[in-house]
Image (cartoon, rainbow, N blue to C red):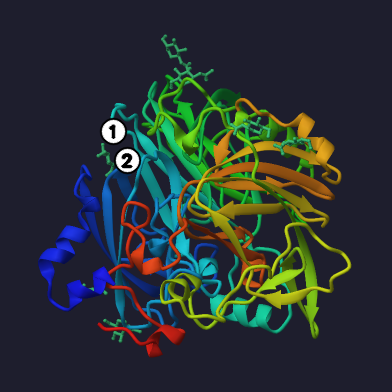
Amino acid sequence: MRSFKCIAGILFLCIFTTSFKANADDSHHYEWIVSLSDRAPLGVNKQVIVINDQFPGPLLNATTNDVVNINIHNNLSDPFLMTWNGVQLRRNSWQDGVEGTNCPIQPGFNWTYSFQIKDQIGSFFYYPSLLLQKSAGGYGAIRVNNRDVIPIPDIDVLIGDWYNADYQDLRTSLDNGKSLPSPDGILINGLGPNQAVLDLEPGVTYRLRISNVGLKASLNFRIYGHILRLVETEGSYIVEQYLDSLDIHVGQSYSVLVTAKNTSGESYYMVASSRFTDTELFGVGIVRYPDSAGDPDGPLPLGPFFRDYQFSLDQARSMRWNLSAGAARPNPQGSYHYGSINVSRTLVLENGVMFDGNKEVFTINGVSFLQPDTPLKLADYFQISDVFKPGVISDRPNPDNPPVFGTSVIYANDQEFFHIVFQNPSEYLQSWHLDGYNFFVVGMDVGTWDESKNATYNMIDAVSRSTVQVVYPFSWTAILVKLDNRGMWNLRSQDAVNSYLGQQLYIRVEGTETDPSKVSARDEAPIPENAILCGRTVYHDYVL
Ligand SMILES: *[C@@H]1O[C@H](CO)[C@@H](O)[C@H](O)[C@H]1NC(C)=O
Ligand SMILES: *[C@@H]1O[C@H](CO)[C@@H](O)[C@H](O)[C@H]1NC(C)=O
Ligand SMILES: *[C@@H]1O[C@H](CO)[C@@H](O)[C@H](O)[C@H]1NC(C)=O
Ligand SMILES: *[C@@H]1O[C@H](CO)[C@@H](O)[C@H](O)[C@H]1NC(C)=O
Ligand SMILES: *[C@@H]1O[C@H](CO)[C@@H](O)[C@H](O)[C@H]1NC(C)=O
Ligand SMILES: *[C@@H]1O[C@H](CO)[C@@H](O)[C@H](O)[C@H]1NC(C)=O
Ligand SMILES: *[C@@H]1O[C@H](CO)[C@@H](O)[C@H](O)[C@H]1NC(C)=O
């Protein structure tokens, strides 16, 4: 209850109890106004979510260990939350901006997110997490710079599928049981064909921070005549690879180094093309050198055949963690030697579908996530029973149980070491994301997973990241994760439609203290002073 005393006027105590921020090296303050604006990236007018009138939204540019305060003013007619995809928010799921951790910012209101970006570097992005608002934009790039490394010039490249329909119409159509049509196109930095331009200086090496910010479509990115030197996956340095093109699945981020040619006067096409869609879609932009006149001379760069999943599988499996690179923390994930830690629990999570009347919804192990009236994190804090309970979702799929709606929360103890297998029996590629963590991607293959597959795992230098794909059909991906970050963490399909329609759950990572209000601030950040209350917390007996 400490934090409520601040509001009651004991300012000194308030400052004292929030002093976990005091060793931060720097702080940033942003005021963001979220509103709708008529834009037409593909030539068709649409209500786009802009931030301070920008689409994509402003860059969140920080250095590791900085404190970030972002005051978000909701000028939409819908409730709003922003989530920080890939930012680990250490011990602070209060700031995660998803429906299970925060009450939404109501229209006409504002709320200040406040978090420290601890011991992390890399390329990430933010996006609106509620109500399919992501299909209207509202996203932007996050860079977390390394304090000790002299930066090279950075360019953010946000690529994603795009629908011309307004997000409320797309949502209504999903709510009525219709599936989304094919996207209308692919945007690069919020722009349509030939509109996105990267200006390069001859001879200079750039770091392109590329994220797939779209709803569903996997994309392949490439630049004509330029090699992509892949160096980072969502905050880990990886063994460098020289690639002609890179597959980036929904929700994933990478850094690639691109060395500009030595000559001026030319321009080239860059492409983000869809993978595994009904027809191949192209987002096209231009890489331009000084004194170049007009359109690129060359053709579009060639990529893999758009239905070739083997390319995607091989490329993902070829990535290796660079054990000698200095990352933000010398010891990310709590151990370099993840291969020698004993697994405390194995979960096999299988994606599926279920029919609710005529409406198709999505499940994990037969449970389609039902958002309760009160955010889980708040219900936990105020110890309101009946909002959620353990055991709703089983550790393995059970084909004998009919699919149901339920509020899936997996209970875990701080420091447990989980082995999670994502099993994909469908004919669509899946992309999975865990908030609050990076995990090691130790195995990925076609077929059905069983225990014997663990003999094939990479137990030495698997990449560490927060979003991973499972190719199709009938494939699996295995991850290992050290649950050393207390809080209520969302595990979701990064396919915005699938997670909107139930394909998500929460992992509740706690210590032994059973009264959440007595947890030490070193173990977990206290409830924010400005926490918005909603659902059953509004009627709860506490003192403001
Ligand atoms: C981002 O922050 C870094 C580190 O402070 C700084 O060097 C760089 O110029 C900033 N970039 C932008 C675009 O603000
Ligand atoms: C959005 O901003 C406009 C102009 O400031 C204001 O008139 C309107 O009431 C705001 N709408 C909401 C929902 O906040
Ligand atoms: C809302 O914004 C005002 C400044 O515009 C700020 O003083 C206030 O703290 C904000 N409220 C919350 C809950 O963050
Ligand atoms: C690993 O990272 C270091 C430091 O960034 C770099 O010098 C080295 O080339 C990388 N090693 C490989 C094999 O990519
Ligand atoms: C640019 O010129 C330098 C020096 O001549 C050479 O080493 C380098 O390979 C050239 N780079 C490209 C991309 O052609
Ligand atoms: C892992 O389990 C084995 C067998 O139970 C045990 O001998 C070993 O000490 C454990 N290792 C660690 C690091 O706990
Ligand atoms: C792999 O399987 C063996 C035998 O079942 C087990 O001892 C080991 O813990 C497993 N490793 C992982 C990473 O699950």
For badge 2, the amino acid type reads Thr
Query: Farthest residue in the right direction?
Result: 400
**Which residue shows up at 80% across the image and 78% down it?**
355
Q: Amino acid at mark 1?
A: Arg
* Image-quadrant location for residue 270: top right
What residue do we see at 68% from left, 68% from top?
A: 391
Quarter that holds the N terminus: bottom left
Along the viewing direction, whichever of 50 and 146 lies nearer the viewer: 146
Q: What secondary structure is marked by label 1? A: loop
Q: Quadrant of ligand 5?
A: top left
- Position of residue 529 in the picture relative to residue 493 (left or right): left
- For the point 51% across and 47% down, the residue is 211
> Which comes before the other along the chain, label 2 or label 1?
2
Q: Position of residue 524 (x, y in %)?
A: 37, 56
- Return the residue nearer the eye: 137 or 452: 452
Residue 521: percent from left, percent from top: 31, 56
Q: Residue 147's mark? A: 1
Disc 2/disc 1 C-alpha distance (Å): 6 Å
Residue 405 left/right relative to 416: right
Q: Residues within 10 Å of mark 2 (few under 14, many from 20)?
A: many
The answer to whether marks 2 and 1 mark residues whose Cβ atoms lie closer than 8 Å is yes
**In the rendering, at what x and y percent does residue 134 appear?**
52, 66
